[in-house]
Image: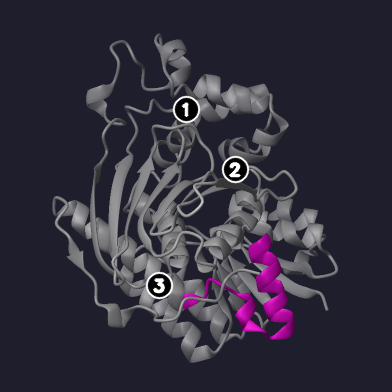
């Protein structure tokens, strides 16, 4: 059975999830695309052979029709999730929802209630749960390799250019238009910690701020746009240099350059940098989201985990250290090393799959997520999905608590264990 899909939101994430149908046409196929930008809508629809009557200028226009597909991918902007989820669930669509579920906690609760009320399968795109690397870490921890977990250090190295692209110039630069950077970027990581530690969080604290990308750090002689700037050649965040490099790299033309412009020529890129937000000086934008943040999570069983999200790194896989009573585990998204305290020996596990790297589908997570979701829709076996609404709500509550703590100067926020799931989904296959 090939599951039919409607794609709501034809940006980079919607297109990435739709790509599963190209790789596995015997398992899924796209029959409808809803997107207000005609160029993006038609480009994705053309790729999948969607006829004219399957192309819609909005999710509302799609929802005005009888159900056209088995399932729908909702990859609209962060603040446009709850509306389409409610309407499309009522029509009987199973839903794959891009993270975050919603930018405020009450709307996340509403999403969970919609899934319960309608009985549809709702899966949140916590893609890190579906990587071969995560499966390997989960198996090692569950097997008792490190004993009881005492502490975890986890780093999300966003990358200097990625942060400038997405969180200073791009769609996630303002919390009031999208969501806080911790929620937008790191609900993944809080979810991952919850999944691997396999315990209920009871306390969260956080510190962080917008340290660097602000007018007070603007170099002398800098212009409002990189194309006009006398000091651009010495700036780490030069849009002129970065996007020219992307134009010369076929992989980076797919992302991030395609977000900047659909005209992937030198003239097209320069015009986008002249007129659009991606050509602005990083010290003269309207951004307000945090660029470096540390979160501490205490779990009911006594383990403590720290998450650091930072713009000031090379972009790459998350890096994690797990300290236990019998061993120590360190991973970089591809390889895992474990030191056994009994023997003193260190072993290494290679968890790469097909050469996947940090820039190719979240290390296999995009494909793994879609494979699980599509199979669950086809067979009705919901246990295949490891990121349902309730466990996803847990990570979002952790993120909201962290933001409350950060805004209060780092004061710890106590969590109610009764509001969290007591059973974490079984280990990845």
- The residue located at (39%, 10%) in the rendering is 231
Asked if marks 2 and 3 touch (Cβ < 8 Å), the reply is no
Residue 165 vertical placement versus 207 (above, below):
above
Q: Which mark is residue 279?
A: 1
Residue 69 visible (yes or no) = no
- The residue located at (45%, 52%) in the rendering is 341
Q: Estimate the x, y position of residue 331 in percent, counting from the top left.
A: 52, 47
Which secondary structure is most common in the magenta stretch? helix
Sequence-wise, which precedes: disc 3 or disc 1? 1
Does residue 388 show up magenta in the picture? yes
Q: Identify the element where label 2 is drawn.
A: loop
Residue underneath mark 2: 358
Q: Estimate the x, y position of residue 156 in percent, counting from the top left.
A: 43, 45
Sequence-wise, which precedes: disc 2 or disc 3? 2
Residue 232 vertical placement versus 92 (above, below):
above
Find the distance from the CA under tag 2 to the CA under tag 1. 25 Å
Q: What is the magenta range?
A: 368-389
Residue underneath mark 3: 393
Find the distance from the CA under tag 2 to the CA under tag 3. 25 Å
- The residue located at (41%, 45%) in the rendering is 155
Between 270 and 395, the residue placed more toward the observer is 395
């Amino acid at each position: 059975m090939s599951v039919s899909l409607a794609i709501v939101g034809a940006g980079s994430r919607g297109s990435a999830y739709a790509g599963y149908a190209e790789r596995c046409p015997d398992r899924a196929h796209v029959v409808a695309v809803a997107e207000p930008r005609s160029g993006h809508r038609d480009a994705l629809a053309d790729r999948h052979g969607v006829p004219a009557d399957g192309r819609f200028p909005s999710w509302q226009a799609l929802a005005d029709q009888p159900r056209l597909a088995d399932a729908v991918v909702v990859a609209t902007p962060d603040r446009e999730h709850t509306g389409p989820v409610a309407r499309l669930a009522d029509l009987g669509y199973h839903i794959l929802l891009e993270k975050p579920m919603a930018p405020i906690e009450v709307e996340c609760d509403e999403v969970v209630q919609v899934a319960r009320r309608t009985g549809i399968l709702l899966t949140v795109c916590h893609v890190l749960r579906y990587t071969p690397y995560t499966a390997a870490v989960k198996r090692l921890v569950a097997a008792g390799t490190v004993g009881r977990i005492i502490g975890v250090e986890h780093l999300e190295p966003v990358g200097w250019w990625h942060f400038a692209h997405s969180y200073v110039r791009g769609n996630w630069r303002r919390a009031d238009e999208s969501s806080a950077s911790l929620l937008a970027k790191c609900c993944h990581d809080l979810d991952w910690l919850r999944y691997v530690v396999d315990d209920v969080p009871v306390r969260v604290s956080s510190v962080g701020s917008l340290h660097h990308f602000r007018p007070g750090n603007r170099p002398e002689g800098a212009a409002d746009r990189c194309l006009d700037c006398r000091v651009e050649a010495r700036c780490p965040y030069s849009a002129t240099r970065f996007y020219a490099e992307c134009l010369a790299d076929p992989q980076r033309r797919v992302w991030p350059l395609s977000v900047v412009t659909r005209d992937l020529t030198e003239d097209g890129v320069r015009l986008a940098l002249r007129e659009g937000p991606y050509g602005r000086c990083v010290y003269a934008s309207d951004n307000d989201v945090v660029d470096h943040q540390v979160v501490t999570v205490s779990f009911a069983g006594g383990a403590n985990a720290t998450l650091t999200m930072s713009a000031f790194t090379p972009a790459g896989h998350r890096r994690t250290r797990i300290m236990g009573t019998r061993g120590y585990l360190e991973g970089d998204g591809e390889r895992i090393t474990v030191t056994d305290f009994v023997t003193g020996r260190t072993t290494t596990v290679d968890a790469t799959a097909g050469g996947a790297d940090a820039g190719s589908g979240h290390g296999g997570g995009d494909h793994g997520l879609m494979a699980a979701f599509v199979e669950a829709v086809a067979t009705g076996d919901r246990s295949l999905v490891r990121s349902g609404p309730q466990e996803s709500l847990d990570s979002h509550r952790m993120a909201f608590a962290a933001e409350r703590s950060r805004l209060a100067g780092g004061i710890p926020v106590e969590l109610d264990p009764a509001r969290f799931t007591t059973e974490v989904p079984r280990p990845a296959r």
